[in-house]
Amino acid sequence: MVDNEVEDVIRQLEHRISRLEGVLHLEKMITESGGKIFATNGKTADFHATMKKCKEAGGSIATPRNPGENDAILYFVKSFNTYAYLGIKESLIPSKFQFLDGTQLTYTNWYLHEPSGKGEE
């Protein structure tokens, strides 16, 4: 009996999660790419506040590692007609960038002559 009860609880939770994800998709608050979920609260904040909110939600600031993930972030940029912060920083070598943890970027999709530091990257 216990196994059946656990299975019922799991099915109920999966159903509730599916409904919540559906609502968030409709509200353009989440999107997915490669098994990762990208989310926003749609509010404007500075970089440090954004990092804090991501951590509070159990995630991290978006770091595109391939074209699909880049498109997931671009979805929010277009939906909210704004910019997005990325989990990338300039390294000690000028004009070279790395992930916030210091590891080297393996994917970029900068515009020509970017990043320039003028906010148009």
Image (cartoon, rainbow, N blue to C red):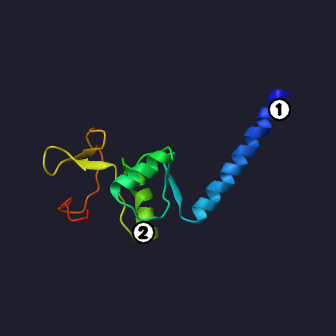
Say which mark, if any, is on residue 4: 1
Say which mark, if any, is on residue 117: none
Rendered residue at 26%/39% (across/down) = 102
Residue 110 is drawn in which quadrant? bottom left
What secondary structure is marked by label 1? helix
Residue 18 location (% of width, % of height): 67, 52
Dot 1 amino acid type: Asn
Rendered residue at 42%/53% (across/down) = 68
Relative to residue 92, is residue 27 depicted above or below? below
Residue 61 location (% of width, % of height): 40, 50
The Cα atoms of the two marked residues, 2 and 1, are separated by 45 Å
Q: Work out whether mark 2 precedes mark 1 in sequence or the reverse, and give the earlier one.
A: 1
Query: Is residue 83 or residue 114 the one in the foreground?
Result: 83
Would you say 59 lies left or right of 6 here? left
Rendered residue at 52%/56% (across/down) = 31
Relative to residue 23, is residue 91 depicted above or below? above
Residue 27 location (% of width, % of height): 57, 66
Say which quadrant the N terminus sits in. Answer: top right
Relative to residue 77, is residue 54 depicted above or below? above
What secondary structure is marked by label 2? helix
Would you say 53 lies left or right of 92 here? right
Query: Is residue 107 or residue 12 the one in the foreground?
Result: 12
Which residue is most to the right?
1
Q: Crowding near pointer 1: few (<14 within 10 Å), some, many (20+)? A: few
Residue 121 is drawn in which quadrant? bottom left
Tag 2 residue: 78
Which residue is most to the bottom?
81
Dot 2 amino acid type: Lys
